[in-house]
Amino acid sequence: MTAIALTRKRPFSGGRFLVWVGEHVVLVTVAVLFIAPIVFVVLTSFMTSDQTLTATVWPNPWTFENYLKAFSEVPLLQWFGNSALYAVLATAFMLVSSVPAAYVLARIKFRFANVIFIAIIVAMLLPPQVTAVPIYVMWAKLGLTGSLAPLILPNLLGDAFSIFLLRQFFLTIPKEYADAARIDGNGEFGVLWRVIIPMAKPGIAATAIFLFFHSWNDYYGPLLYTSENPAWWPVAYGLATFRGSHSTDWGLTTAITMLVMIPVVVIFFFAQRTFVEGIALTGVKG
């Protein structure tokens, strides 16, 4: 018993202690590499213009002028509204179209199902630059360029990555639940609405968060369709344009950057458990 007690009191002995130190050094180093740029942006946002990009690391004095100027010198609230409209509608339209499509591919046997699934994977891997010109010409002929419509409306036809991710999650749900619902008289829509969707909430939430963040941070799409109309600029494109014309005012630029990051950080903070659970439970069944 004495030997066991001594062993428990000295868990880090010899090589095990070196392994423990090595592991934690690596983790601390990686954490510092990730956190350091964020700390730099935060500190810079509280500096005056004559302190930024100098040897000064700590703001002296601390100033909130950059955050006040962010709302007075740029249409930040308008950018936020455009990004919220883009992200919310795109996510909602994606769920309406992609959830049924993923359910059909996961649970209903029909001819050419595998061909359609392969086509979805190909569409997911296809670079958007390849189809940018013909799609832009189509929206231009419809008179919808200069707005967010070309970025929002395509989600009514489904999103390849979202369909793929949801299909993989639906495959992890035991078929017995759906069979029991059919025995109770439910059709396929009833099975989807009453059984699959309630059980797949983590996967659906994870997919929605993926598309919401992608839409919020999207730069290429707004550059292509809204650059000619500042009234429809979202925060990502607006911030990039502002940075290009005010490259010397790093205090104001980092302050706007921090304000743009806040909604994403808050959403992920409250939804991280559901997001992680959805990703962890998403299967890889074919």
Image (spheres, helix red, strand yellow):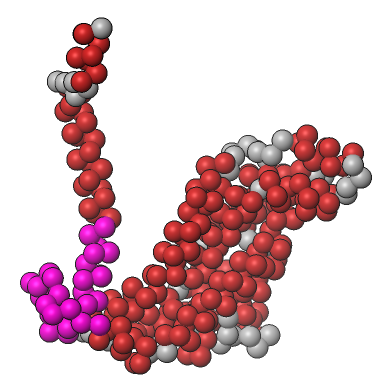
Return the residue nearer the eye: 138 or 261: 261
Q: Is residue 82 left or right of residue 188?
A: left
Which residue is outermost to the left?
55
Q: Nearer the viewer, residue 129 or 89?
A: 89
Q: Is residue 11 left or right of residue 131?
A: left
Above/below status of 233 relative to 6: below
Q: Position of residue 240 (x, y in %)?
A: 37, 79
Furthest residue to the bottom? Answer: 72
Residue projecting furthest to the right:
185
> 163 above or below 136?
above
Magenta span includes 58: yes
Residue 178: which quarter of the image?
top right
Name the magenta segment's main secondary structure: loop
Quadrant of res 114: top right
Q: Nearer the viewer, residue 137 or 78?
A: 78
For the record, the magenta segment spans 35-64
- Number of numbered discs: 0
Q: Residue at x 25, y 82 (%)?
A: 64
Identify which residue is drawn at 22% across, 60% down.
36
Question: Can see residue 224?
Answer: no
User: Within the magenta stretch, is there residue 90?
Assistant: no
